[in-house]
Amino acid sequence: MQDKPDLAALIGSRICHDLISPIGAIGNGVELLMMDGAAKTPELALIAESVASANARIRFFRVAYGAAGGGQRIARGEVAGIIADMTRGGRLQVEWVSEADLPRREVKLAFLLLQCLETAMAYGGRVRIEKGEGGWVMQAEAPRLKIDPALWEVLTERHAPAEIGAGQVHFALVPEELRAQGRRLVAELKENAIRLGF
């Protein structure tokens, strides 16, 4: 019997696919304006920066929320590029340490958890994500963390009650992805640090 399709992931993939082309076209238009000798005004620079940011976010969302078939792999360089583009100029610094290619499903889970860390690190900080022989370790440190205990319980407690809005949907998706991969998450929350292992 065939598994039911993951409709949420397919919708995520479709939305990202449909948005990336027009955003890329806007970026190309800005480049053409600059090549044609248009003045590099602050407005044009802001548009170019916003397009680059939107493009990076969509690439990130495509991995985190999109469909990830069984044997699909993603290159380390692509992952590092997505993270570098997404965090450029922001308060969050992310270091990605892994071998060359990785299963896309594992990167999907790491990206969802990175969003959970990002939610807790509203004031910025550093995250180190490492894939080793024993599994994945994500270490986050920040001068100030904003941890909602009910949201973090959702990640490790099978039936943890929590009101989850659209801005925290990644917390609801992590347990589903853990189950799909047959993994268990270990989370340690401290005043200025969070450690996740799976």
Image (cartoon, rainbow, N blue to C red):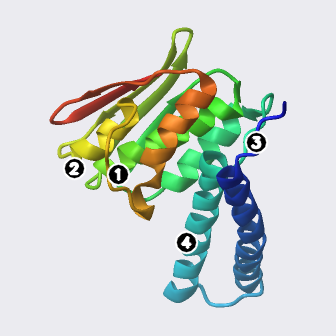
Q: Is residue 41 visible?
A: no
Q: Residue 68, how many percent across, how many down?
A: 73, 40
Amino acid identity at mark 4: Glu
Name the residue rendered at 76%, 45% in the picture. 5
Query: Are the two marked residues, 1 and 4, in contact with CB atoms closer than 8 angstroms?
Result: no
Tell me which label, 4 or 3, sits earlier in the chain: 3
Direction front: furthest residue: 1
Q: Which residue is mark 2?
A: 146
User: How far apart, in angstroms, are the residues tagged by discs 4 and 3?
Assistant: 40 Å
Camera-nearest label, 4 or 2: 2
Q: Is residue 154 visible?
A: yes
User: How far apart, in angstroms, are the residues tagged by discs 4 and 2?
Assistant: 28 Å
Number of other residues with Cα within 10 Å of mark 2, as a class: few under 14, some 14 to 19, many 20 or more: some
Query: Are the two marked residues, 4 and 2, in contact with CB atoms closer than 8 angstroms?
Result: no
Tell me which label, 1 or 3, sits earlier in the chain: 3
Q: Which residue is mark 1?
A: 119
Q: Residue 109, how many percent across, how many down?
A: 56, 35
Amino acid identity at mark 1: Thr
Amino acid identity at mark 2: Lys
Query: Are the two marked residues, 1 and 2, in contact with CB atoms closer than 8 angstroms?
Result: yes
User: How far apart, in angstroms, are the residues tagged by discs 1 and 4?
Assistant: 23 Å
Specify whether 108 is left or right of 46.
right
Q: Tag 1's secondary structure?
A: helix
Q: Tag 2's secondary structure?
A: loop
Amino acid identity at mark 3: Lys
Q: Residue 69, how many percent across, how many down?
A: 78, 36
Number of disc labels: 4
Direction right: furthest residue: 1
Height in image: 8 above or below 73?
A: below
The image quadrant where one finds the N terminus is: top right
Q: Find residue 49 and name its label.
A: 4
